[in-house]
Image (cartoon, rainbow, N blue to C red):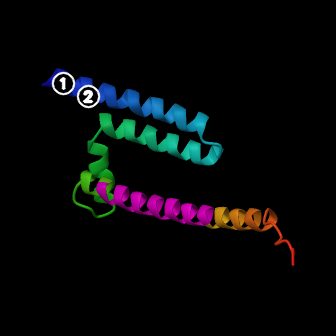
Amino acid sequence: MIIAKALLLSFLTLICIIMGIYVVLAIRAFIIGLLLSIVYLLTIILLWRPELSDAIAAFFGIGRGLDLILIISVFTLANVTFFVVRRLFLQSKSIIKIVRYLALAEAKMPSKSN
């Protein structure tokens, strides 16, 4: 059981390290990449020292560290979903404007053959 836990923690740590490097290299906005890398670093710390999440949760008046992590996760996912949907909506409006412009620009004038 101890070996399985150590392997799981090592695997999750490796995933967090890879994702932390990836977001710094792949995301054009440096600040966002840096913030996400910090989140991955904090995740690694909480993986190896889970009692820290309990201490942080107690500071905020929440019973368990897991409850705090779940609250933050739900809040974050809700906000990310909102921003993605908003961006898709704005992108859709832009595409509609471009298509309308192209349709009007390439429209053929009716010929008067009377």
Q: Residue furthest left?
A: 1
On-image quarter of the C terminus: bottom right
Q: Quadrant of the N terminus?
A: top left
- Magenta stretch: give its range: 70-92
Residue 31 vertical placement versus 103 (above, below): above
**Tag 1, which secondary structure?**
helix
Farthest front residue in view: 114
Q: Residue at x 45, y 30 (%)?
A: 17
Quarter of image, res 59: bottom left
Magenta stretch prevailing secondary structure: helix
Residue 52 location (% of width, % of height): 31, 45
Q: Which mark is residue 66?
A: none
Q: Tags 1 and 2 in contact by the CB under 8 Å rule?
A: yes
Mark 1: amino acid: Ala
Instruction: Please state which amino acid type lies under the numbered disc 2.
Output: Leu
For residue 113, side relative to residue 10 (left or right): right
Vertical placement of residue 7 versus 53, above or below: above
The residue pinned by badge 1 equals 4
Closest to the observer, 81 or 58: 81
Would you name the residue on which mark 2 appears?
A: 8
Q: Position of residue 83 (x, y in %)?
A: 52, 62
Q: Nearer the viewer, residue 26 or 46?
A: 26
Q: Is residue 71 within the magenta segment? A: yes
Q: Residue at x 37, y 30 (%)?
A: 13
Question: Label 2's element?
Answer: helix
Tell me if residue 85 is in the magenta stretch: yes
What residue is drawn where x is 51% and y is 40%?
A: 37
* Residue at 39 percent of width and 62 percent of height: 75
Q: Rounded to the nearest whole Å, what is the CA distance between mark 1 and mark 2? A: 6 Å
